[in-house]
Amino acid sequence: MAQGAIRIERDEFTGVTLDLIGRSFGVTSLHGFDVFYTAEDLFEEVMYRRAGSETGVRCDAAMLFFRLRGNFERLSPGTAITPSTRLKGLARLSPKRLRKRLARESGLAMPDDEVGWLGCAMVLVGVIGAPLMWWQVDFAAGCLTLFGAGMLSMFDRGGYTGRWETVWSLVDAIASKNVPRKDAISARSRTEDLWRRYAEILAHSAMPEANGARLVDAHRIERHTRIEVV
């Protein structure tokens, strides 16, 4: 049975749904379009803006966002999690501790830590300080400086930069380590494949059905299904 209508909270639609669709299909400037009468209306707009382009990231990354959103919400209860949410303001853990926690809770391989301020400082000491000590004092002093910098760098807690800057940058990096590249959206660009991925994002964004028994089934979302932003 086809889904007659799906209801999506306005903040969810503008802050998450449109963002994920845009990132997944390589489409920009979807924000501001908060009224689409049917699923087909939005899909056709996406296809129009995507015409002639095969850009976009794996839609599996969008699905992974929904899978991990609960983990991020537990870091700061009450905070609305969107792809653009910055991890530095969300987590009160060091990047290394957050990496271990997410790996434990999700069972997924995590990307390597980004270098923090201590690590950067020790790199400078190793690159500049060690040769300077060798020149000013002796070879042993240079080696000792380099060794000390290497030991101290082990205490670096990581930094919320690069892959660990935002929720999306981290989710996309996690997808890169756990999802085969053959599932890239560019590898499956038939209209029906694009629709299936698009419908999955809508289904995960939608509010539970009226009976509250289960979430919306992506397979039941058809072109005439209405999108009700509430």
Image: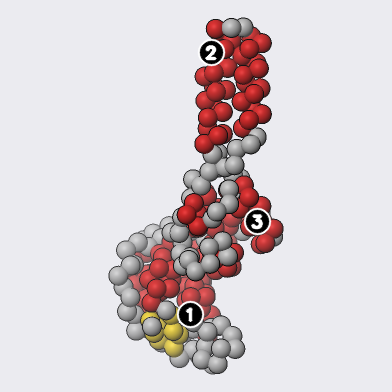
Mark in front: 3 vs 1:
3
Indicate whether 13 appears above or below 214. Answer: above
Residue 10 coordinates in the image, percent (x, y)? 38, 77
Residue 202 percent across, percent down from the top left: 47, 76
Residue that mark 1 sits on: 206
Point out the tag, 1 or 2, that comes first from the N-terminus.
2
* Residue for point 66% across, 62% down: 106
| Horizontal side, residue 182 vs residue 26: left or right | right
17 or 27: nearer the viewer: 17
**What residue is shown at x 54% (from left), y 39% (from top)?**
116
In the image, is 190 to the left or to the right of 51?
right
Q: Residue at x 55, y 34 (%)?
A: 118
The reply to whether residue 225 is in sight is: no
Q: Is residue 44 above or below residue 141?
A: below
State the residue position of label 3.
Answer: 101
Residue 121: x, y in percent?
A: 53, 30
What amino acid type should be assigned to the residue bearing mark 3? Arg
Q: Which residue is under mark 2? A: 132
Which secondary structure, mark 2?
Answer: helix
Which-is-in-front pick, marks 1 and 2?
Answer: 2
